[in-house]
Structure formats: C-alpha cells, structure tokens
Image (spheres, rainbow, N blue to C red):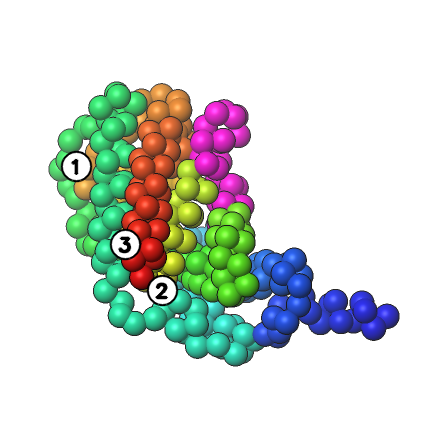
Amino acid sequence: MNKIKTFIWNIIPFNNRSDMPLILYVIKVILIFWVFKFASELAGEGIVLALHFACGKNPLQGEMFDSNTIALISYFGYGFMIGIIFLLWKLFQKKTPAELGFTKPAWSYFVGATAGAVLVVISVALTVLTGAIRFNGVFDNINTGMVLLMLGGFVFQGAFEEMLCRGVVQQLLQKKSVPVAVGVSAALFTISHVLNMDFSSPAIAVTAVINLLLISLIFSLLTIRFRSIWAACGMHSIWNYILYSILGLNLSGSDEITASVFNMSSVGKNILNGGVYGIEASILTTAVLVVAATLLILFTARKSKRA
C-alpha cells in the first residue's frame, strides 16, 4: 500500500517532486502537460462563452458572433490561457517564468520570427513552382485591420503552444535528459495536432506527422541554442501568421480564412500541397525542414565544440 501511495504521490501533477526514476518523471511531466493544457483551454472556452452572454448572445441556442469576431476572441483568448499557464506553473511547480524558458534577453524572438518567415515562404514558393498551389494575385479589398489584429492573436497562440511543449515539458525534462526532453515534447506536440489531419490519404497524414516532428525538433534546438523559448515562440507565431493571414492558405487543417493579403489556393489534394491539411503536410516542406534542422544541428554542435 505504501508503495502505491508513493507511486501516486510521485507522478501526481500537483507537486514539484522530481527525485524519482526517469520513466516515472516522464509520466509525471506528461500528466502535467495535459492538466495544464486542458485547464487553460477550459478557461479559454469559458471566456468565449462569457463574452457571448455578456453581449446578449446565447451560443447554446446558436447565437454566435460573426466569424471574424470569433477568430479574434479565440486567438486573443490565448493571452488569457498563457496567464493560466503562468499561474499553474507558479502554484504547482513553484518555479519562475525564467525557469519556464523566458530568460533574458528576449531579442532571440526576432531571430526565430525571421527564420519562420524565411522557411514558410520558401516552402510555399517551391509548392507554387510545382503548380500544386496557384497564386491568384492580391485581394482587392483587404481587411487591413483584421490582418494586423491577427498578428497579435498569433503571437499569443504560438507562445501558448511553445510554453506547453518547449516550456513546461522540455524545461522540466532536460535537466534529467536532453534527448528525452526533445523526444517527449515532440511527441506531445504532434499528438495535440493530429485531430485536424485528413486520414483519407495515408501519404499526406504520414507526411504531416513527419513535418510536425521536424518542426518540433527545430523549436527544441532553438530553445537549446538560445537557452530560452523566445526564439521558438517567434518562429512558431510568424510561421502561422504568414501562412494563414498573409498567404491565405490552410493552417494545420483549418481552411476557414478570416482575412489575408494574397489570394492563393491549392490545386487538388496531393503530397505536394498537403491537401486539406495544407503545406505543413507537403513533402516539399519536409525537404525544407530537413535542411533547416540539419543546419541548426551543425551550427549548434560547432558552437558547443568551440565553447
């Protein structure tokens, strides 16, 4: 009985114990991830519902804001969810924001943002050259306000996901094992994105999983390289923002574009454009991410060797 109590006490996510075998600590961190994720998302959903009721709408009866308003509320709601993560981190892990990965200086955010912009533009450009994505020009009536506001929303959205994976998971596990920390964060990041995948095409689904693992590896390498999650947050947010609100393409299976600058569309559903999931399930994106990850590994290894 005492062994069972000790086991439960070890893996329960509501304390900051870490003095246990690695496998038990991995289980504990995975539970922490899901508790933090569900608690913050539940709070976020509550905020969305509360705003509807506060404005005289009853979403339970189908009374909803228009799609643009819902998108803004949802994406800026990630800011509130980030606050929940900070609160849970402080209450249960007894740790500071710096121990979550928000170390100074924060300028690496812009390094990651630049890298994200370059990688997503190259991936889309290659797909356009193959004819799998059609460039139809620039929209005549661009909702500039919406496009600009969505940038703020994606800043919150990218930071939220990175706080969970490269923050909570990687920061807790890397003190015991960096490879395990990278692997577990990649697995959880991938699992949390599979619900939007189109499993009617096994080739596209497999490519999407590979790309999720690759981009997660890049986020983890950036976190290790800069000893913070700022760069990963920047790359994640800007990749999503450019893909969705600038280029107007599907983002991780979401095809409901609120506003964008360029009018682009997929030609058919194939391994080149990623089908419904978008270029994040494209084999061309795989090639781009492999090159990026390889260069980052070599650069990080060289820097470590010099140090």
Amino acid type, callout 3: Gly
Q: Residue at x 53, y 30 (%)?
A: 199
Q: Residue at x 33, y 55 (%)?
A: 305
**Residue 256 visible in the picture:** no
Q: What span is in magenta?
A: 189-210
**Is residue 226 placed above or below 214 in the rendered structure?**
below
Amino acid type, callout 2: Ser
Please state which of the two labelled residues, at mark 1 or mark 3, is closer to the viewer.
3
x%, y% of residue 44?
46, 63
Mark 1–mark 3 contact, CB under 8 Å?
A: no
x%, y% of residue 235?
30, 52
- Residue on which the image places disc 2: 228
Position of 23 with respect to 250 (left or right) is right
What is the crowding at mark 3: few (fewer than 14 residues within 10 Å), some, or many (at least 20)? many
Please say whether residue 207 is one of the residues in the magenta stretch: yes
Mark 3 and mark 2 lie on one chain; the one further toward the N terminus is 3
- Residue on which the image places disc 3: 112
Please say whether residue 296 is one of the residues in the magenta stretch: no
Q: Within the image, what quadrant is residue 125 found in?
A: top left
x%, y% of residue 285?
34, 34
The local secondary structure at tag 2 comes to loop
- Residue on which the image places disc 1: 139
